[in-house]
Image: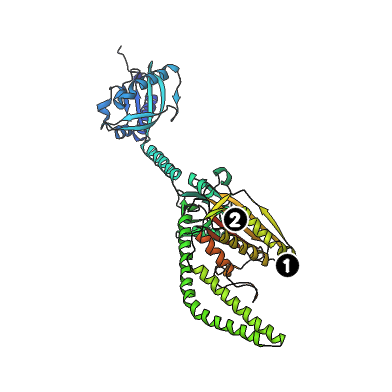
């Protein structure tokens, strides 16, 4: 009797089903998107599907019967043989994709590439067969590396990069944002971006979010933002949309560059140019006006001495006093326009403020105005004591005048890092309308009733602050009072870090 093959022992029906099943399995293996490689117990290749051919660059007929090492970089071969051997001894039937750790393959060209792998084993005719399913992870690794690179770029950027959703909630916050705005990431994540925006500019955020929802990106623009400590900084802001995989806009990336120092220098230059222009004008008028004023003043004196009736003599004295007042205004303008000698001495800012407040004490009592102090111990600046005292006294007088119906005058100081000090003078008066705030430093401009102000006090203050390398700003809202912020460099410093 002849020996029959295993299939021959089966009935025709079962044999047909088996062949049909094997054909389906072969079709699945051949059409699989992943590489499928089977090895015997000696780790020689027994199966190599078309996807494996495409992945490794070898034809199946070239590798069948060859050691699996053919597909592995040399430095990984010993470890891989050991790993596969141990797996075969465990009796486990499979290990899922990603559970094998880092796996690397070797193409026929010599190129090494990363792989994801799963492994399984079956017993067949008393022999063990190990099958590995491999997936090329090159694209994923490239994408991961690109993501890492982008993350490093964001982390190392000198610009603040803040991610937010379409409701304005902060989603990401890089180290530069922490440095520029003063908040740690955990303090702002999930909060509204409006925390960084001055109250009078909140509509700016809503407008930009609406623009993004409409599919457009706002043009880069320069604006003001708030630090955690309340300081205002000048930034150039670029808002770009963030899209999901379908292209839909789901948020925005806001990149901010701090340009406070440049903005401050440009503003000082403009202020210096304005004062210089005014000086040219005043110097030209001083002679033409001063000479006839001296003539009027002389005749007023003669007239007073020649009159016998006291009422007429009083009228002559009034003429003389008014002429002197005009002459004093002209002299004030000339003093503003002329270069000042560089008087520099240590000035204790808080002691100087106390002296100015003492001068105002009687005035404040008459107007039912109380004063508050909040000093931080800022020490000294280098400057002209007389001019600085006049500058701060003007601010205090203005604040008192703004509260004729009573209120609170608050004077505070603080250090801005190691380089500068800040003085704030705040009143609880009626405030200044936004359309008038740009004019308050103009010569002869005043919001006081006629005859109650020359319109030069704030100009004198600004001139003194600018000459000391500092800056002055107004923050006011109608019905909520006004606050002047003066920043001066510390002793020996030429620049201030904040506005």
Q: Residue at x 42, y 27 (%)?
A: 101
Q: Residue at x 31, y 34 (%)?
A: 55
| In front: label 1 or label 2 | 2
Q: Position of residue 405 (x, y in %)?
A: 73, 67
Q: Nearer the viewer, residue 76 or 489?
A: 489
Q: Nearer the viewer, residue 219 or 227?
A: 227
Residue 216, disc: none
Q: Quadrant of residue 126?
A: top left
Q: Position of residue 204 (x, y in %)?
A: 54, 60
Does the rendering let one see residue 168? no
Pick whichever of labels 1 and 2 is earlier in the sequence: 1
State how the image is colored.
rainbow
Q: Position of residue 360 (x, y in %)?
A: 68, 62
Q: Distance from label 1 to label 2 (Cα)?
A: 25 Å
Q: Nearer the viewer, residue 14 or 356?
A: 356
Q: Position of residue 192 (x, y in %)?
A: 58, 52
Q: Nearer the viewer, residue 200 or 143?
A: 200
- Where 60 sits versus 241, above or below? above
Q: Which residue is mark 1?
A: 405
235 relative position to 68: left or right? right
Q: Residue at x 65, y 81 (%)?
A: 318
Query: Of helix, strand and loop, which one carries label 1?
Result: loop
Q: Which residue is mark 2?
A: 423
- Where 107 sits versus 495, above or below? above
Q: Quadrant of residue 102?
A: top left
Numbered circles on residues, count: 2
Q: Quadrant of the N terminus?
A: top left
Query: Of helix, strand and loop, which one carries label 2?
Result: strand
Q: Mark 1–mark 2 contact, CB under 8 Å?
A: no
């Amino acid at each position: 009797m002849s020996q029959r093959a295993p299939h021959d022992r089966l009935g025709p029906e079962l044999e047909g089903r088996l062949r049909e099943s094997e054909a389906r399995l072969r079709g699945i293996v051949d059409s699989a998107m992943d590489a499928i490689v089977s090895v015997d117990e000696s780790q020689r290749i027994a199966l190599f599907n078309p996807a494996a051919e495409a992945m490794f660059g070898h034809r199946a007929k070239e590798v069948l019967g060859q050691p699996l090492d053919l597909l592995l970089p040399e430095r990984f071969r010993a470890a891989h043989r050991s790993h596969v051997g141990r797996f075969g001894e465990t009796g486990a039937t499979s290990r899922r994709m990603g559970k094998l750790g880092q796996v690397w393959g070797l193409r026929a060209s010599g190129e090494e590439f990363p792989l994801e792998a799963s492994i399984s084993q079956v017993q067949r005719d008393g022999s063990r067969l190990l099958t590995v399913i491999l997936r090329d992870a090159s694209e994923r690794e490239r994408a991961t590396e690109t993501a890492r690179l982008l993350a490093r770029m964001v982390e190392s950027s000198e610009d603040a990069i803040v991610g937010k959703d379409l409701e304005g909630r902060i989603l990401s916050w890089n180290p530069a944002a922490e440095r520029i705005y003063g908040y740690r990431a955990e303090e702002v994540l999930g909060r509204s971006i409006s925390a960084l925006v001055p109250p009078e500019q909140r509509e700016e955020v809503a407008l930009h979010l609406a623009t993004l929802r409409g599919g457009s990106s706002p043009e880069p623009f320069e604006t003001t933002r708030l630090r955690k400590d309340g300081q205002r900084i000048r930034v150039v802001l670029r808002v770009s949309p963030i899209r999901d995989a379908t292209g839909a806009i789901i948020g925005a990336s806001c990149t901010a560059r701090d340009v406070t120092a440049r903005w401050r220098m440009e503003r000082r230059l403009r202020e210096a140019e304005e004062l210089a222009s005014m000086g040219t004008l005043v110097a030209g008028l001083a002679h033409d006006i001063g000479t006839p004023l001296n003539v009027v003043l002389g005749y007023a004196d003669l007239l007073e001495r020649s009159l016998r009736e006291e009422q007429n003599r009083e009228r002559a004295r009034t003429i003389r006093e008014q002429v002197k007042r005009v002459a004093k205004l002209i002299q004030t303008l000339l003093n503003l326009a002329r270069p000042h000698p560089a008087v520099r001495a240590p000035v204790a800012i808080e002691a100087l403020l106390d002296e100015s407040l003492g001068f105002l004490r009687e005035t404040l009592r008459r107007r039912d105005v109380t004063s508050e102090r909040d000093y931080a111990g800022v020490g000294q600046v280098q400057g002209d004591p007389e001019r600085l005292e006049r500058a701060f006294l003007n601010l205090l007088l203005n604040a008192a005048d703004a509260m004729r119906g009573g209120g609170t005058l608050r004077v505070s100081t603080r250090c801005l890092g190691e380089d500068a000090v800040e003085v704030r003078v705040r009143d609880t008066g009626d405030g200044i309308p936004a359309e008038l705030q740009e004019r308050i430093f103009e010569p002869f401009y005043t919001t006081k009733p006629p005859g109650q102000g020359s319109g030069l006090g704030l100009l004198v203050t600004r001139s003194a602050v600018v000459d000391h390398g500092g800056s002055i700003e107004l923050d006011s809202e109608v019905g909520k009072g006004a606050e002047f912020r003066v920043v001066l460099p510390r002793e020996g410093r030429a620049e201030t870090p904040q506005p």
